[in-house]
Image (tube, rainbow, N blue to C red):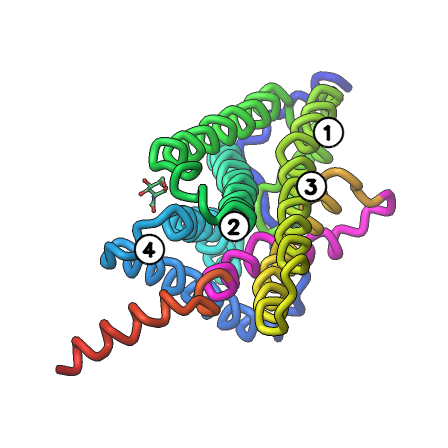
Amino acid sequence: MPGENQTIVSEFLLLGLPIEPEQQNLFYALFLVMYLTTVLGNLTIIILIRLDSHLHTPMYLFLSNLSFSDFCFSSVTMPKLLQNMQSQVPSIPYGGCLTQMYFFMFFGDLESFLLMTMAYDRYVAICFPLHYTTIMRPQLCISLMALCWVLTTFNAMLHTLLMARLSFCADNVIPHFFCDMSALLKLACSDTQANVLAIFVMGGLILVIPFLLIIMSYARIVSSILKVPSVRGICKAFSTCGSHLTMVSLFYGTVIGLYLCPSANNSTNKDTVMALMYSVVTPMLNPFIYSLRNRDMGRVFCKRKMLSFS
Ligand SMILES: *[C@@H]1O[C@H](CO)[C@@H](O)[C@H](O)[C@H]1NC(C)=O
């Protein structure tokens, strides 16, 4: 028995999305459009912010970082998903699978820290407007970004190394559209206790704490605006905070639901659809939610259009 179990898995099969064969082309077109929207939307924001020196403020530099992270995050899964939808044997080599998992975790966590930093930035701007420039000094912004990168590298490295330690036997079919950590853990035939513990501890630190801090800073923002009520101010606060909070809840709600409260009844389809929400839909909508509502970005866009017409 043990001898038979030792077949080393050298590649995995990604089953992809639970889509009927006749709808395959429709979904292929849909995902292609979504991916192109994500790439174009995020690159446009990075370029606009680069070009206009008025936008070199902490808020826009963080937004530019978020756009870069969104662009990379969707590029980790989407091109492979699109390629697999067209191929007969949707396989991925073992090394490719671990690499995908590493970058998926890296950019997913980076997203989490960036959303937290952006909420903190808004909190300082609205609650301590007079001290904003002295608090958000360029050195602090760069240190915050550096800290985000160091923490996410550490976390993604930890999970990838723990995964590389496991052995995979006969079963190499992943019922998912990318090399998802929890789907891989279900296939492993060695002890996964250390991995589960790491997911729980690090997931708590990297997802739950930023999520709570974001909610807290928005709560402080809302309460500080309510202290000096004006109908316009209240509407503005609720429309901005409301859309940010929707995105934040969509991202954290699905990630926390998937990793920290795994469903008992292996409902793989529900997991896959939820994973689509945070890995495909949020990176696509983030640039629109965080910038189109914004007067400054609109101004740059109009100015550039007028320049190109003259
Ligand atoms: C990210 O933020 C840092 C610090 O504010 C900034 O110096 C850097 O240019 C930003 N990176 C991108 C890609 O926008």
Real-space Cα separation, disc 2 to disc 1, in angstroms: 30 Å
Considering only order in the chain, which callout, 1 or 4, is on the residue closer to the N terminus? 4
Q: Nearer the viewer, mark 2 or mark 1?
A: 2
Question: At x 70% / y 32%, what residue is drawn?
Answer: 204
Percent from the top left, x then y, of residue 310?
13, 82
Quarter of the image for residue 143 reads top left
Q: How many numbered circles are shown?
A: 4
In the rendered image, which residue does mark 2 sit on?
122
As drawn, the label of residue 212 is: 3
Real-space Cα separation, disc 4 to disc 1, in angstroms: 34 Å
Q: Secondary structure at mark 4?
A: helix
Residue segment shown in magenta = 264-289
Q: Marks 1 and 3: in contact by CB < 8 Å?
A: no
As drawn, the label of residue 200 is: 1
Q: Nearer the viewer, mark 4 or mark 3?
A: 3
Real-space Cα separation, disc 3 to disc 1, in angstroms: 16 Å
Q: Amino acid at mark 4?
A: Ile
Percent from the top left, x then y, of residue 21?
62, 69
Q: Secondary structure at mark 1?
A: helix
> Measured along the vertical axis of the image, is residue 50 above or below residue 148?
below
As drawn, the label of residue 46 is: 4
In front: 308, or 12? Answer: 308
